[in-house]
Amino acid sequence: MKVLIVHNKYRQFGGEDTEVQSESRILEANGHIIKLYERSNEEITDAGLGRVQIAWETIWSRRSYESLRQHLREFRPDVVHCHNTFPLVSPSVYFACQREGVPVVQTLQNYRLLCPAATFYRQGHICEECVQHSLMRSVVHSCYHQSPIHSGIVATMLKIHRLLGTWKHKVNAYIALTEFGRRKFIENGLPANKVFVKGNLSLAPQLNRFDPQNRHGALFVGRLESEKGILTLLSAWRDVKNLPLRIVGTGSLHSAVKRMIETHNLENVELVGEVDRSEVWRYYQEASVLIVPSEWYEGFPLVIVEAYSTGIPVIASRIGGLQEIVRDGETGLLFNPGDHEALSARVRWVVDHPLEVKTMGERAREVHDREYSAEANYQQLLAIYISVMASR
């Protein structure tokens, strides 16, 4: 099978870029021929694109349309798999695929089709005003890049393609990352028969078995941003004295996190910062639990799958799809988002129940091997490809 993968890279490498690489590798490993059509947000700076040109590219990129049609004629793929098309690839690529008679699969890595900010999160709270009222709410609140103009561009793109029926008729299948995500998209207009569920794929490196008896401490891996619940995590640690916490990552709240650690004398908290992926995997092996205190509708955090693959359970917020990925009492524990007292209570339970935590870690590894391994993910992806090819 030939698969053309379409992706618009972000300036900062992240989970979506990792997913593109991982899926490409697993498809190639199973004998499929892969070609990547990629554009990057670096073009905006490098080419000095003006605001009007960016707006037009976001709504309809003639360059992407013509270029992709050329790739389709030369490569002749069986299926096109789009990951991120925002902003420079644009929805024009769906029309190019239809023109050339090639079915399209689109992974829904975020909520961009429903929310111009892509997060359903605003000023520290879940916000669904754009689906409950109008996309213009994003302009009023300056949701994208804190700019009414930029928000207006995204809202206009979404509105135009809703009117054109792009999302309903130009895409053959969507991949939602969780059942929660699938319901959200169906409730807001996507055809139910076109939305499949498949979690993200993380290719874990070959790791030496680490003695569970030597695991100790909690781990946070992610961006230091308010929606990730990092401040809730630190507030919880003011009541946790006998379990060290290692924080891996950086972001806009890095200075605030550092000040909070110093102000409250959190001696058992280590702010590591950004490190190489190989170092992150070592931290997984050394930790006894991963904490994901997010306060927004996460897509599918790769850190959870990575933690499961190394045999450690996860404490996560009871919100969105996290409630599906982390099975309370089986592969981890859940707490209400933003509730630092509930989080600290969960952490203390982990400290007091080492045998139960070890069992949760073993179950997490079993779930990973059964549902989130490379082979399981590949079989799910292949079934979706075959489905859209058969219905073409």
Image (tube, rainbow, N blue to C red):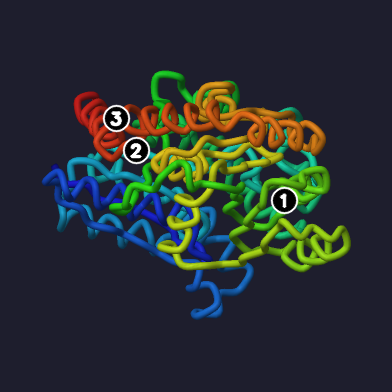
Q: Secondary structure at mark 3?
A: helix
Q: Going from the N terminus, do you reach mark 1 or mark 3 first?
A: 1
**In front here: 358 or 184?**
358
* Residue 365 percent location from the top left of the image: 39, 33
* Residue 299 percent location from the top left of the image: 54, 39
Q: Going from the N terminus, do you reach mark 2 or mark 1 first?
A: 2
Q: Going from the N terminus, do you reach mark 2 or mark 3 first?
A: 2
**In front here: 18 or 243?**
243
The residue to which callout 2 is attached is 105
Residue located at (63% from left, 57% from top): 247
Q: Tell me if mark 3 has few (under 14), some (14-19) or many (20+) residues whose alpha carbon lies within 10 angstroms of its own.
A: some
Q: Secondary structure at mark 1?
A: helix
Residue located at (42% from left, 30% from top): 362
* Residue 77 percent location from the top left of the image: 18, 47
**Distance of label 1 from label 3 (alpha carbons):** 33 Å
Hey, what amino acid is under mark 1? Ile
Q: Quadrant of residue 1?
A: top left
Q: Is residue 390 left or right of residue 250?
A: left
Hey, what amino acid is under mark 2? Val
Q: Tell me if mark 2 has few (under 14), some (14-19) or many (20+) residues whose alpha carbon lies within 10 angstroms of its own.
A: many
Q: Is residue 149 left or right of residue 28?
A: right
Q: Determine which of the numbered discs, if any, sits on residue 230 in the image.
A: 1
Q: Quadrant of residue 9?
A: bottom left
Q: Tell me if mark 1 has few (under 14), some (14-19) or many (20+) residues whose alpha carbon lies within 10 angstroms of its own.
A: many
**Distance of label 2 from label 1 (alpha carbons):** 34 Å
The residue to which callout 3 is attached is 380
